[in-house]
């Protein structure tokens, strides 16, 4: 069954879904024949694309199999960095998107709506103690709530260069705004196939047989893009399964806005792990890590964390801070998600070679939340204007893979 929904997410910790009559949804579109665009995928990339397309006057329908932000966009850390992609192909995309996040926060009341705030970011090395008598570290740089035996403490991000959002609340705030102010429709349904006539896409078919006609289709389905033969015949998108836990410490006010990037040496293992710790203004603390390539399942809502990986993240938590140990913090979530990756480590953003009107945006790996706004804005320009001016998309084009994909 396919239904149309609207999503409301305010205040900060409240998310609700209500049915909307599309015929009464407001729209800023003044053109008599708006371009009909179907955006497939309700994660941050799809939602940002739908938002910016609608702002440019397109008649947009977002198609999502399960729920908006039900996969990685709802389970990510939400970390933003201005210059961490400098020197690589994503430099312009990341810098543009970091600044767009700041602008969107001002427009959408980000601090209250979805926890936007600047952060101090630290890197440090922690060796898991063999006994309970190891003395905590003392450093002017280290926040007081981090009482682990740490060394090699460095500031790698400031309030000017690093920030955060609550990714699920950000994504749902954006789609709610797009529905309320720009007439975007959200359809819950599974994409079965695209109908291509000649060299142009004309419609998509959903599970159950519903046909939705369009002038353009944007495929923004994260690692699930690999399920479409149209895309898998050109390039590979694979999934990295990443684990995370969300804790609610009893003394939440003691946790300052410091993001931690760790080199963590377990007591009985030789190789270091690289977990990350993100306090949130909601009072939660998000901890992630323990990642490996795995086959992407069909149903994003059925993804479960591996007990061993979740257990390791809990060990990291209690080692990093006594505020995060058992008895001091409630475990709010134990979860996993799949990050979409490409063979060359660069996102795929552009029109599908040989299929006019069909576009793709995927492969952002761990930088999907950061790069969502610029990807969406650039894709909107490409679809409506025929080219992107906000970011040069040439290096991201799927055409770079033509002739290189092995059967």
Image: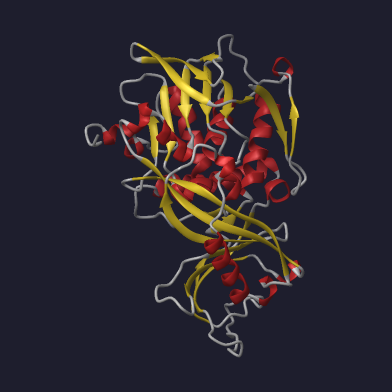
Quadrant position of residue 329: bottom right
Please tell me which residue is depicted at 50% across the width and 18% down the height of the picture: 205
Q: Nearer the viewer, residue 328 or 76?
A: 328
Q: How far from the left and from the top, in percent, is residue 391? A: 42, 38
Q: Nearer the viewer, residue 254 or 287?
A: 287
Q: How far from the left and from the top, in percent, is residue 292? A: 43, 55
Please tell me which residue is depicted at 64% across the width and 51% down the height of the picture: 166
| Vertical position of residue 264 compared to residue 57: above or below | below
Q: Which image quarter is the C terminus in? A: top left
Q: Nearer the viewer, residue 278 or 1?
A: 1
Horizontal side of residue 62 vs 390, given as left or right: right
Residue 267 seen in this snapshot: yes
Q: How far from the left and from the top, in percent, is residue 52? A: 55, 31
Mark count: 0
Residue 81 seen in this snapshot: no
Q: What is the image's colouring?
A: secondary structure
| Vertical position of residue 401 compared to residue 272: above or below | above
Quadrant position of residue 352: top left
Q: How far from the left and from the top, in percent, is residue 136? A: 60, 85
Horizontal side of residue 83 vs 114, given as left or right: left
Q: Nearer the viewer, residue 114 or 2?
A: 2
Please tell me which residue is depicted at 63% across the width and 21% down the height of the picture: 2
Residue at the outermost left position: 403
Q: Which image quarter is the N terminus in? A: top right
Quadrant position of residue 162: bottom right
| Vertical position of residue 200 compared to residue 98: above or below | above
């Amino acid at each position: 069954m396919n239904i149309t929904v609207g999503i409301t997410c305010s205040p900060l910790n409240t998310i609700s879904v209500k049915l909307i009559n599309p015929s009464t949804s407001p729209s800023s579109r003044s053109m008599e024949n708006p371009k009909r665009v179907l955006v497939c995928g309700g994660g941050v990339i799809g939602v940002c694309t739908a938002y910016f397309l609608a702002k440019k006057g397109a008649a947009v329908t977002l198609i999502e199999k399960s729920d908006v932000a039900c996969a990685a966009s709802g389970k990510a850390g939400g970390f933003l960095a201005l210059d961490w992609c400098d020197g690589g192909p994503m430099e312009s995309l990341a810098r543009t998107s970091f600044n767009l996040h700041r602008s969107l926060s001002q427009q959408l009341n980000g601090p209250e709506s979805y926890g936007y705030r600047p952060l101090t970011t630290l890197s440090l090395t922690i060796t898991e103690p063999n006994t309970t008598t190891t003395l905590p570290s003392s450093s002017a740089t280290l926040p007081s709530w981090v009482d682990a035996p740490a060394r090699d403490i460095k500031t790698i991000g400031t309030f000017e260069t690093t920030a955060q959002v609550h990714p699920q609340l950000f994504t749902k705030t954006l789609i709610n705004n797009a529905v309320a102010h720009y007439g975007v429709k959200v359809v819950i349904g599974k994409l079965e196939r695209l109908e291509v006539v000649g060299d142009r896409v004309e419609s998509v078919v959903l599970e159950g047989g519903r046909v939705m006609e369009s002038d353009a289709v944007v495929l923004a389905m994260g690692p699930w893009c690999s399920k479409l033969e149209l895309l898998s015949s050109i390039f590979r998108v694979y999934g990295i399964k990443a684990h995370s836990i969300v804790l609610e410490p009893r003394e939440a006010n003691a946790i300052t806005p410091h993001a931690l990037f760790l080199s963590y040496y377990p007591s009985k293992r030789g190789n270091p792990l690289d977990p990350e710790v993100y306090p949130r203004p909601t009072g939660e603390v998000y901890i992630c890590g323990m990642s490996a390539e795995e086959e992407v399942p069909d149903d994003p809502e059925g993804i479960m964390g591996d007990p061993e990986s979740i257990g390791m993240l809990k060990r990291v938590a209690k080692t990093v801070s006594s505020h995060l140990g058992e008895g001091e913090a409630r475990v709010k979530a134990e979860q996993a998600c799949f990050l979409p990756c490409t063979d060359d480590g660069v996102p795929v953003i552009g029109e599908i070679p040989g299929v006019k009107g069909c576009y793709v945006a995927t492969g952002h790996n761990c930088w999907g939340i950061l790069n969502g706004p610029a990807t969406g804005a650039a894709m909107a320009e490409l679809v409506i204007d025929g080219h992107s001016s906000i970011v040069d998309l040439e290096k991201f084009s799927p055409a770079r893979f033509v002739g290189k994909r092995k059967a």
